[in-house]
Amino acid sequence: MDFNFKYPFTIALFVFFVAISTISAQEQKVADSLVKIYQKGNIKNAEKLELLRNLSFNEVNNLKLSLRYAEELIALSKLENNYLYLHRGYFQKGNKLRLIGDLNKSLDAFFKSEAAASKAKYSVGQGTAFSAIADVYSVMGNSKNAYLYYDKAIKILRRTDNSIGLASALLNAGDEYFKNKKFDLALRNFKESGKIFKKADYLIGTAYNLGNIGMVYAEQGKDVLAMQYISKAIKILEELKDYYAISDYLTYMSAIYLKQNNMAFALNYAQRSLELAQKYGLKDQISNSNLKLSELYQIAGNPIESFAHYKNHIIYRDSIMNLKSVQQMADIRTNYEVSQKQIEVDLLNQGRKNRQIIAISSSISSGLVFLLAFGMFRRYKFIKKTNVIIEAEKNRSNSLLLNILPEETAHELKQNGKVRAKKFESVSVLFTDFEGFTQYAEKLPPEKLVESVDYYFSKFDTIMEKYDLEKIKTVGDCYMCAGGLPFSTDDHAYKMVQAAFEIASFVKDSKNNNPLNDTRFEIRIGINSGPVVAGVVGTKKFAYDIWGDTVNIASRMESNSEPGKINISENTYELIKDTFNCDYRGEIEVKNRGMMKMYFVNNPTT
């Protein structure tokens, strides 16, 4: 099992799992001892897979070496068709790439990790992979996608017995809410995950929750509560030697004391944060601590110290973010300030004539520096504005693609330029058709006809989304959808029947209330379950579609249904008979399949 925790303001890796014995993620000596076993080369199959996972996980000093272990694990898992370890290999690869800073490749690895977990029917792996995907989107600044994948992760993990994985996803989602100043939602998530961590006696998770709750209280102006919670978090983290988070929380304590006008304590906490970050080489925290100290010294009236810390903040920030244009602006400002200080010293030691010459030179230099700085600033603003436009267009393109294709399929299409057809052994297919639609269509104006159909199908789409079902297509007044793809599930038949009941109820209410005046339809519904082949057709206008006898039989179930009724095949009946009351209707002949039994679904059993 693999879990990620996001630290406040930054992202860092914290992973936990149980292997042959309990292994600490921060013990490099574990990796060193495992290397000796690896070098002997006398283990094979499952043992070697587990060894490679441990090596990749525990190797913390050399990320490139850890990445090579993950790649070897992936290759071996593919050879042995072991999807569980393929998931773990891609997960470790994603973690290492994220630490290196290659976010796009990290995201790709996590998507592949989730796909492998799905094939292995490993729900915990799917949930943790979705959570990791959300973490990467968060680092990219794409909160919309981060929220989407945190929600997916939490929904899946709630259905498992993996409480730590669920709490971790709730914690990270809460951090995203906090980052976007949605403090009430952040507090809700932190408190729920905190209860789970406390029940499991999971100290590291408890510490993060205490610290994050403290930060929320600080933002809400509840400084006393904020200091209490953050102090508790720091105390636990000191015992666990988790210096990354301690540094962040110390910076936040400094901010709280600054609000209380306690400059001595504010400086003390900020300096402790910087010293800790420097000792352990934590670049993000060095940058943040320097920024806080720069702010404090500026307020205290010490511009020299303030600027020195500000310069260090810029250096470390840009070594992480690689923003060259901003760095150039910082250098210009530094050079200008230094030259001004030097001029002041020279003016004290030279005569009147020299002072006039230096003053004129200083004015000219200042003007040139100002013009250069202004030009760099305009360039930086232009690049930033352009990136915002590009990101918006990219998101719009992704949104349009997701409206056409299932999410996994859309991702595969973007990555490879094509989508391989896949066979799904068990899915449920639903068809609907409006009774007497043709007669109404002949009488209605085109605008009213389209409005009527859109009224129904828009609601059907909402119902599909509610039950995690996939809309396949509409043809005229026929609506087709499927459950159990693109991710295999065990409850697709149950969800499909539930959705069918909502569709039937909505159509019945619409007929009785007649909100569009011209809409007076009855609906027939048919469902069948079985294997299908799914894929994308077309090269310019993509369409996701499914094929097979299962689809044909579902269509026959619909055509042999009755208005307001849900007609299902024997295949579907076997999957839902313990949950719903059904009436046997008899048999119909299906082309190439002979006689098949049909049932009307009445209502859930009590």
Image (cartoon, rainbow, N blue to C red):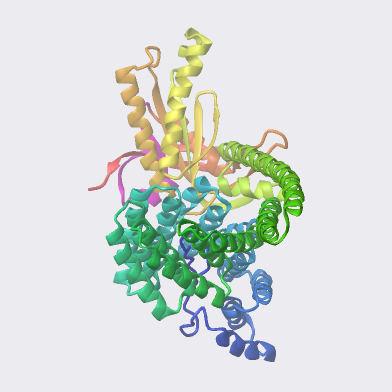
294 sits to left or right of 98: left
Q: Nearer the viewer, residue 261 or 274?
A: 261
Q: Position of residue 445 (x, y in %)?
A: 50, 8
Q: Nearer the viewer, residue 120 or 415?
A: 415
With 266 as the anchor, is 410 left or right in this view?
right
- Asked if 78 appears above or below 536 in the picture, the reply is below
Q: In x, y percent, where is residue 586? A: 38, 38
Q: Position of residue 17 (x, y in %)?
A: 48, 75
Q: Residue at x 38, y 72 (%)?
A: 234
Task: Judge whether residue 162 can be spotted in this image.
Answer: no
Vertical order, 397 against 204 (above or below): above
Circle count: 0
Give the farthest residue toward the left.
Answer: 606
The residue depicted at 47 percent of the width and 18 percent of the height is: 451
On whether residue 584 falls in the magenta region, the answer is yes
Q: Residue at x 64, y 66 (%)?
A: 100
| Left-right relation of 276 to 544 | left
Q: Of 467 and 2, which appears nearest the observer?
A: 2
Vertical position of residue 303 compared to residue 45: above or below:
above
511, above or below 86, in the image: above
Report which quarter residue 542 is drawn in: top right
For residue 108: magenta?
Answer: no
Give the extent of the magenta segment.
563-587
Please state if 277 lies on the left or on the right of 234 as rendered.
right
Question: What x and y, as percent, mark residue 130?
Answer: 51, 57
